[in-house]
């Protein structure tokens, strides 16, 4: 299939993610009786619009997001307000907070159901390797496991804690005092073994040097393996993957903002489209997987306390809720303009990094 087809798929996938984000705002606003003047997918000059149920539904060409324009709220003119009963400004601070938070929450819900559908369908091992059965496939040379364990041993318990999935092995070893006691199944017989983990220096997902404890085993993986989940397992998988994706993004933002991770890791629109295209070429399961991750990313980033983002508006409303008075209009306007300037800079910087990566820049 040609590149144009995959670009279309990327546009469609991103539009779905943005649509659900804005749908969260829309539904919460309508629940509290706020008029939604426009529901737009994309920014810029409107290519298509239709009036329905009191709202203008629009599609614009710059697919880096979208927005719902609520009556009485205008980010481009923060001081423009309306006190009509169906306006955003007439609602109580806690109601406004729910309206603002509903967009990111919708992204988390979308990601959860994508992960859930993936699990029920059967997830390729490359995107669900953590959920392999705890059966040993390989033993590292000169490792603690090499002396005592064998290929096809199944780990049942570590220090009395039941092991159901492969990822639990590392978690238990990390948080358990040495030595560790293993209960394994070998050729139909249970065996009790004791070994001491080895501490190694490694790189984490942020390319930081860390120390971690290992016993030196790799899982048994079959070619083109599909991991199947029952209903309850699929629910657990969806919850864990959504939670872990959100925590990973939060940590990434924290590490970049504190300088622990190079800002060159910030990507822009080109990176997003490139990721979607690469994953979509691998198949529908991979496309859904990257959509879930991007959806969580959008939800987390919109909760950051940056004026002009949902998180920034939530902070303003929390201030009003706590102090029982609205922020100074002068301060509100200045912070909102700063927020927009920062977002424009961040988008430009991400685009600069994208171009650098394409041209092999360092």
Image: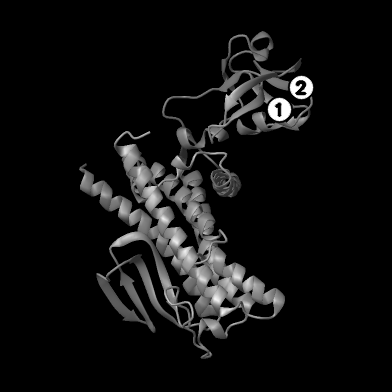
Vertical relation: 119 (above or below) 137: below
Q: Which residue is mark 2?
A: 180
Residue located 51% across and 60% down the image: 302
In the picture, residue 183 is in which quadrant? top right
Instruction: Specify the label residue 324 is tagged with.
Output: none
Whole-percent x and y of residue 202?
A: 58, 24
Rendered image coloring scheme:
one colour
Find the distance from the CA under tag 2 to the CA under tag 1: 8 Å
- What element does badge 2 sit on? strand
Whole-percent x and y of residue 186?
A: 66, 16
Q: In front here: 212 or 232?
A: 212
Tell me, yes or no, if residue 281 can be seen here: yes
Quadrant that contains the C terminus = top left
Q: In front here: 105 or 333?
A: 333
- What element does badge 1 sit on? helix
The answer to whether the residue labelled 2 contacts the one labelled 1, judged by CB atoms less than 8 Å apart, is yes
Quadrant that contains the N terminus = top left
Q: As drawn, is 124 to the left or to the right of 190?
A: left
Whole-percent x and y of residue 85?
A: 53, 90
Tell me, yes or no, if residue 275 can be seen here: no
Total number of numbered discs in the rendering: 2
Q: In front here: 57 or 190?
A: 57
Q: How many other residues sit within 10 Å of disc 2, few (<14), some (14-19) or many (≥20)?
A: some
Residue located 41% across and 43% down the image: 285
Q: Tag 1 or tag 2, which sits nearer the N-term?
A: 1
Instruction: Specify the label residue 173 is tagged with.
Output: 1
Q: As drawn, is 112 to the left or to the right of 153?
A: left
């Amino acid at each position: 299939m040609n590149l144009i087809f995959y670009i279309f798929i990327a546009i469609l996938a991103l539009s779905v993610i943005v649509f659900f984000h804005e749908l969260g705002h829309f539904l919460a606003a309508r629940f509290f009786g706020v008029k939604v003047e426009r529901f737009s997918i994309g920014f810029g000059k409107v290519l298509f619009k239709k009036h329905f149920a009191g709202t203008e539904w629009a599609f614009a060409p710059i697919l880096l997001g979208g927005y719902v324009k609520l009556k009485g709220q205008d980010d481009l003119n923060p001081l423009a307000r309306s006190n009509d009963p169906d306006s955003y400004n007439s609602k109580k601070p806690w109601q406004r907070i729910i309206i603002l938070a509903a967009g990111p929450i919708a992204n988390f819900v979308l990601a959860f159901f994508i992960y859930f559908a993936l699990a029920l369908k059967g997830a390729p091992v490359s995107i669900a390797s953590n959920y392999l059965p705890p059966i040993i496939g390989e033993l590292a040379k000169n490792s603690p496991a090499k002396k005592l364990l064998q290929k096809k041993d199944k780990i049942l318990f570590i220090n009395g804690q039941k092991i159901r999935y492969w990822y639990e092995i590392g978690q238990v070893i990390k948080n358990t005092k040495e030595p560790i006691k293993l209960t394994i199944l070998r050729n139909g017989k249970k065996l009790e073994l004791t070994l001491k983990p080895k501490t190694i220096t490694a790189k984490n997902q942020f390319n930081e040097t860390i120390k971690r404890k290992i016993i030196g085993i790799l899982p048994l993986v079959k070619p083109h393996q599909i991991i199947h989940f029952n209903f309850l397992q699929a629910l657990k998988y969806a919850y864990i993957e959504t939670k872990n994706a959100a925590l990973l993004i939060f940590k990434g933002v924290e590490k970049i903002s504190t300088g622990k991770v190079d800002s060159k890791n910030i990507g822009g629109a080109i990176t997003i489209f490139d990721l979607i295209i690469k994953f979509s070429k691998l198949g529908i399961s991979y496309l859904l997987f990257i959509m879930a991750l991007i959806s969580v990313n959008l939800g987390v980033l919109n909760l950051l306390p940056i004026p002009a983002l949902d998180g920034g508006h939530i902070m303003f409303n929390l201030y009003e809720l706590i102090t029982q008075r609205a922020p100074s209009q002068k301060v509100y306007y200045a912070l909102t303009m700063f927020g927009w300037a920062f977002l424009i800079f961040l988008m430009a910087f991400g685009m600069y990094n994208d171009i650098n990566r394409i041209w092999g820049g360092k």
